[in-house]
Image (cartoon, grey):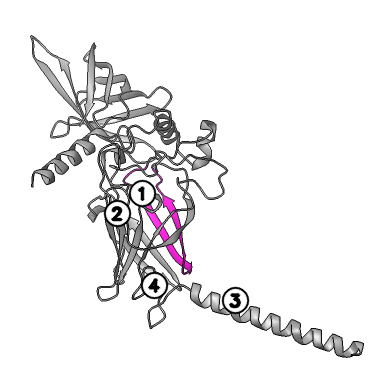
Amino acid sequence: MRSLLAAGLLLIAGVASAQEGFPLDGTWRGERPAAGSTAVTIVLVLEWDGQKIAGVINPGPKSIPLQDMQLIPDGWKVTLAAKDAAGNTISFEGTIADLGSYHRYIDGAWQEGGKTYKVRFVHE
Amino acid sequence: MNRATSVAGLAVLILLAVGCQKQASEKDDASNAAPRYPDGVLRLDRAPGEKGYWDSPSELSLAEEGAKVEFDASGKLRQTADAAKVAPLQPWALALYLYRQANEMKDDPMRSCIGPGNPRAMQTPGGVRIIQDRNLNRAYVLFGGGNHGWRVIYLDGRDPPSPDEVTATFYGLAVGRWEGDTLVAESIGFNTRFWFSNGGLPHTEGLKLTERFTRPSHDVLHYEVTIDDPRTYTRTWKASWNLKWVPGDIPEKYCEDDRE
């Protein structure tokens, strides 16, 4: 029983450690600073269809569809552009790091409301 | 003995020799023929009373048929510059393949005993069996390599599944049929938790495989796979290799992280 449990844990650890498929596919979570010491969570849900990267920012009733998202394989650069419901521009430029890991991340600059924030998105 | 008699004698000897050779050759052909069920359907596994399995794939890494590239046993390219020849990769997929190659495939999920998935399982040393269950109209493919996975090919005439209704797995959902002596299996519904080849060729959940299993002789299984993943590759492409019949049972072994 104990060995079965250990094997199961190994399996879970293995699944969680590997990167597979299109590097941006899936859910990414990051935080940007807000007023005081609080932070605003930003969730990206992305999917590659073979031609373009589709997705939304913060899925739910107030989700924001992506206008454009690009992955530049040379250097694994990422760019994102969107407009919120009020028509304000949102953009992000970053670089994927730890590409071989399931929990790879993108460090970059998130621009929203005329301000720029350093944000790290981690793949979930 | 005149000359005519000598020539006639020589001709008889030649005919006898040819006849013996033909008889021996026919006998060899018969003993090397692929086994069949009484109704003539090809057996892709053992005949009754026999022990054996498929192993020793003639190609150890996946590459498009006709591509002039060389790998080592781990799937590492001898020449990195050949990466684009391996398969018609989209730019992101080529970059990821090169990244994995440069990293000596250290992130390969199989190093953590994750299954090889398909079609890599057919290139993973350790043994393969294809058991035809003719009562339930399906074939089970059992793998001795990797984490000893298995898959089912449904042969009951069902329609291929809708991609939206398939839970993604390592081997996908396969529906098959016989075309003469060839078992044709079409699979969709793959997850992306495995590497498509030991060298690190990527794939997405859009992957569709068409596999063709034939047994040209008792000792040879010919495997051909057509890869259709428009999210990863610029066009469909094909690869094929042979597996050899090995007498005996699939050796028992256990998978542990980073070693087997």
Q: CA distance from mark 4 to mark 3?
A: 23 Å
The chain that hosts pointer 3 is B
What residue sits 54% from the left and 33% below the top?
Answer: B79
Of the numbered discs in the image, which one, if any, rests on residue B182? none
**Numbered disc 3: secondary structure:** helix
Q: Horizontal and vertical percent for residue B71?
A: 49, 40
Q: Which residue lies under the disc numbered 3?
A: B25
Q: Dot 4 corresponds to which residue?
A: B43
Mark 4 vs mark 3, foreground winner is: 3
Q: Nearer the viewer, mark 1 or mark 3?
A: 3
Q: CA distance from mark 4 to mark 1?
A: 28 Å
Question: At numbered mark 2, what does the secondary structure look like: helix, strand or loop?
Answer: loop
Percent of width and height locating residue B169: 25, 50
- As rendered, which of B62 and B1 lies closer to the eye? B1
Instruction: Estimate the spatial distance between the alpha carbons at disc 1 and disc 2, rounded to whole Å.
Output: 9 Å
Identified by mark 4, the residue type is Arg
Nearest to viewer (mark 4 / mark 1): 4
Relative to the observer, which residue lies in front, B99 or A58? Answer: B99
Q: Would you say residue B234 sits in the magenta stretch? A: no
Q: Pointer 4 and pointer 1: residues touching (CB < 8 Å)?
A: no
Nearest-to-viewer mark from 1 and 2: 2
Residue type at numbered disc 1: Leu
Is disc 1 on the same chain as disc 4? yes
Overall secondary structure of the magenta section: strand
Corner quadrant of residue A34 = top left
- For the residues labelled 2 and 4, the Cα–Cα distance comes to 23 Å
Q: In which quarter of the view is residue A73 placed?
A: top left
The residue that disc 2 covers is: B172
Could you say which disc has been placed on residue B207 in the image? 1
Q: Quadrant of the C terminus of chain A?
A: top left
Subunit ID for the residue under disc 4:
B
- Specify the segment rendered in magenta: B203-231
